[in-house]
Amino acid sequence: MDYRLYSLLAFLFWGFWGFLSKIFTRNIPIGTFILWATIATILPVIVFAFITKTITWNGGVPLYILTGFTGSLGTIFFYLALQRGPASVVIPFTGMYITIPVLLGYIVLKEPPTLRHILGLVFALLAVLFLSE
């Protein structure tokens, strides 16, 4: 399948995930929501790993676990922010996480951003600023 279709599906699922997260974090204890929402992420991942037969154990596993750990911490803080703030501000602002891999890609991986990339980041930042007012 083409990466653009995968990107569209991620966009749609994440869009509904953000909206549903805002709805449900308003009325139940945040710890309860985070626990069950996180547990629910395991099943599709397990099914995917078995269907694609891509489960391996190698020396990188501790780093993969660290990656998941950082993502989980980000998720907890995202839900806390969403519970306390407007979705129209929290979701675009936290969506700016893309700037970190872009900058680290430039600094660490020597992936120079194009003018188009820089303009995209500037417009994304402007969108967050406009939405947060």
Image (tube, rainbow, N blue to C red):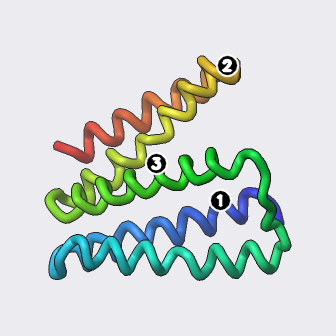
SS of the residue under disc 1: helix
Question: Whole-percent x and y of residue 100?
Answer: 49, 33
Query: Residue 64, relative to residue 100: is it above or below?
Result: below
Residue 75's label in the rendered image is none
Residue closest to the eye, 43 or 101: 43
Quick one: SS at disc 2? loop
Question: What amino acid type should be assigned to the residue bearing mark 3?
Answer: Thr
Reading the image, the residue beneath label 1 is 7
Occupied quadrant, residue 7: bottom right
Q: Position of residue 16 (x, y in %)?
A: 43, 73
Q: Which residue is mark 2?
A: 112
**Dot label at residue 70:** 3
- Residue at x-position 25% and y-position 51%: 89
Q: In the rendered structure, which amino acid carries the disc numbered 2?
A: Pro
Of labels 1 and 2, earlier in sequence is 1
Say which amino acid is labelled 1.
Ser
What is the CA distance from the residue labelled 1 to the residue labelled 2? Answer: 22 Å
Q: Are marks 1 and 2 in contact (CB under 8 Å)?
A: no
User: For mark 1, does the 10 Å Cα neighbourhood hold few (<14), some (14 to 19), or many (20 or more) residues?
Assistant: few
Quarter of the figure with the N terminus: bottom right
Corner quadrant of residue 55 = bottom right
Q: Nearer the viewer, residue 92 or 63?
A: 63
Mark 1–mark 3 Cα distance, whole angstroms, equals 22 Å
Looking at the rendered image, the disc whose residue lies closer to the viewer, 1 or 3, is 3
Q: Does residue 114 appear in this view?
A: no
- In the image, taking residue 107 as reference, residue 85 lies left or right, namely left
Q: Is residue 37 visible?
A: yes
Q: Is residue 51 left or right of residue 30?
A: right
Label 2 to label 3: alpha-carbon separation: 25 Å
